[in-house]
Image (spheres, helix red, strand yellow):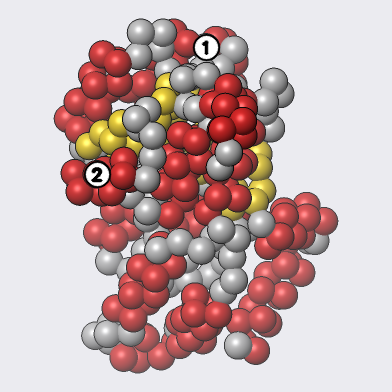
Amino acid sequence: MNKSASATMNRNGNDKSIVITGTSTGIGRACAIHLDRLGFKVFAGVRKKEDGEILKSVSSDRMTPVLLDVTDETSISDAFKIVEERTGDGLHGLVNNAGISLGGPLELVPVSDIQKVFDVNVVGMMAVTKQFIPLIRKAGGRVVNIGSAYGFFAVPGQSSYVASKHAAEGLTDSLRLEFSLFNIPVSIVEPGVVETEIWGKSAETHEDRCNFKDKDILELYFPLLESAKKYIHQRKGVQPVEVAKAVEHALTSKKPKHRYAVGSDAKMASLMKRFIPARMMDYLVMERIKKQ
């Protein structure tokens, strides 16, 4: 990058402070690096110290890795204290990115896995936001939640993940109204398929489901499991930086959007949801699964 381009990008961020959760890999990492290059002072939430060191090695001196487990109240509180000490004028933005995907038909999924998905994807998002509200309000900042196209377009065999992302949609809508009292914009970014590690982890989870003890029950869901495995291995998604660009717009635009669908698949799903009746949509989805 040449010096003039770098200077232009740095002026965009103007050293404003941003907290991002789940920056070790994927979308979170892309957001941290992208916003750092734009000149933001990024507090990058990681669960392991070594992940923070790796992230810092490819970033500027503005990057500050912070140990942050969104399922641990003490960890959230400790991270808040670090950010509060280093931001005199409050927090310009909070990007709630941390998330996990544990797939499988509901009957095959342990309740403990369902709890884990909601602890990270929903309760964690709420807990972090709740903790950082005072700093966001102080700076007149913004909140950006990373959702998913699955938050408005449901598919079978992913009930836990889909439900958590629907919850993120509702949470975002509610917070947008609550925070309007303080002129704090709240947006949600809804990616379709993104080339990240979460899909590999999801594939491993589906393999685990195939070891379900009751083979008769497992056989009933065979079409869903096979379709999911093929989809995971054949999917072609956008690069994480495309999601980071949507986050950038939500943080810097004078009029940020309420929702950002990222990727052609997410945009198509949004249109289908709006214009195709639910009964017809169910038919089309299940027919596609049967053909796979």
Q: Could you say whether the residue bearing mark 1 is in a helix, strand or loop?
A: loop
Q: Amino acid at mark 1?
A: Gly
Residue 159 in the image, given as x and y percentages of width and height: 46, 62
Q: Which residue is mark 1?
A: 140
Where's residue 213, x and y in %?
A: 24, 85
- For the residues labelled 2 and 1, the Cα–Cα distance comes to 30 Å
Q: Disc 2 or disc 1, which is closer to the eye? A: 2
**Closer to the camera in the image, 79 or 49:** 49
Name the residue located 30 percent from the left edge and 16 percent from the top edge: 86
The residue positioned farthest toward the right in the image shown: 275
Quadrant of residue 194 within the rendered picture:
bottom right
Give above or below for 132 relative to 217: above
Q: Residue at x 42, y 18 (%)?
A: 91
Residue holding disc 2: 53
Position of the N terminus, as image quadrant, is top right
> Quick one: quadrant of the C terminus?
bottom right
State the residue in front, 183 or 245. Answer: 245
Looking at the picture, tell me which residue is in the foreground, 178 or 278: 178
* Residue 200 spot, x, y in % from top left: 39, 71
Tell me the residue at 66%/81% (across/down): 288
Q: Residues within 10 Å of mark 1 (few under 14, many from 20)?
A: some
Q: Position of residue 230 (x, y in %)?
A: 52, 83
User: Is residue 150 shown to the viewer in this render?
Assistant: no
Q: Identify the mark nearer the N-term, 2 or 1.
A: 2
